[in-house]
């Protein structure tokens, strides 16, 4: 994990009741964490924002709020750490640049194989025509 620091005013945590199995505990304890982050306050570059938008998908609202719901664990503190870790992982992934593709050319042998295949196909197709007897 990176040592990224997220300002306190950039995010808001809401504690809600989790869904799924857990019996009475899940119904009465607000252990799930909904982390809402204003991505415009994070100071991301336009390229990083574009990549974050692609990574986040529907978790990023039209107003620029990233919503992360963490309810994997039984305790509120564990879910809180999980939500923050997922946010940092998402931001780190958005900061990574795509590797530029290095253009390559086909080798001489590859070109020769391609030409040979074309010639073979040509003879097969030529054999399909009617034979003219003069």
Image (cartoon, rainbow, N blue to C red):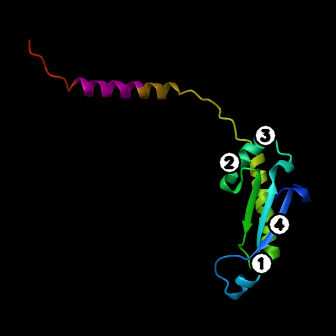
Q: Which residues are magenta?
A: 115-126
Image point 77% across, 82% down: which residue? 29
Instruction: Please tell me which residue lies in front, 96 or 17.
Output: 17
**Mark carried by residue 49:** none
Q: Residue extending furthest bottom? A: 24
From the image, tell me which residue sits under label 3: 46
Instruction: Give how far apart the Cα atoms at labels 1 and 2 are.
Output: 30 Å
* Residue 106, image x, y percentages: 53, 28
Residue occupied by mark 1: 30
Q: Earlier in the sequence, mark 4 or mark 1?
A: 4
Kindly state the secondary structure of the residue where label 1 is placed: loop
x, y percent for residue 60: 72, 53
Whole-angstrom CA distance, mark 2 to mark 4, is: 23 Å
* Callout 2 touching callout 3 (CB < 8 Å): no
- Number of dots carrying numbers: 4
Disc nearer the start of the sequence (1/3)? 1
Q: Position of residue 45 (x, y in %)?
A: 82, 41
Q: Quadrant of residue 5?
A: bottom right
Query: How far apart in space, not on screen, are marks 2 and 3 (Cα)?
Result: 13 Å
Q: Nearer the viewer, mark 1 or mark 2?
A: 1
Looking at the rendering, in which quadrant would you find the C terminus? top left
Q: Which residue is mark 2?
A: 54
The mark closer to the camera, 3 or 4, is: 4
Q: Earlier in the sequence, mark 3 or mark 4?
A: 4
Tag 1: Cα neighbours inside 10 Å, few (<14), some, or many (≥20)? some
């Amino acid at each position: 994990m990176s040592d990224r620091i997220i300002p306190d005013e950039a995010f808001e945590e809401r504690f809600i009741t989790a869904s799924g199995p857990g019996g009475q505990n899940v119904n009465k304890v607000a252990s799930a964490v909904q982390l809402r982050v204003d991505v415009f306050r994070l100071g991301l570059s336009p390229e990083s924002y574009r990549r974050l938008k692609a990574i986040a998908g529907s978790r990023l609202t039209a107003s620029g709020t990233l919503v992360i719901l963490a309810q994997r664990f039984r305790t509120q503190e564990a879910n809180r750490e999980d939500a923050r870790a997922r946010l940092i992982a998402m931001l780190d992934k958005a900061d990574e640049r795509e590797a530029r593709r290095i253009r390559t050319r086909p080798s001489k042998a590859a070109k020769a194989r391609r030409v040979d295949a074309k010639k073979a196909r040509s003879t097969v197709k030529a054999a399909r025509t009617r034979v003219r007897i003069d």
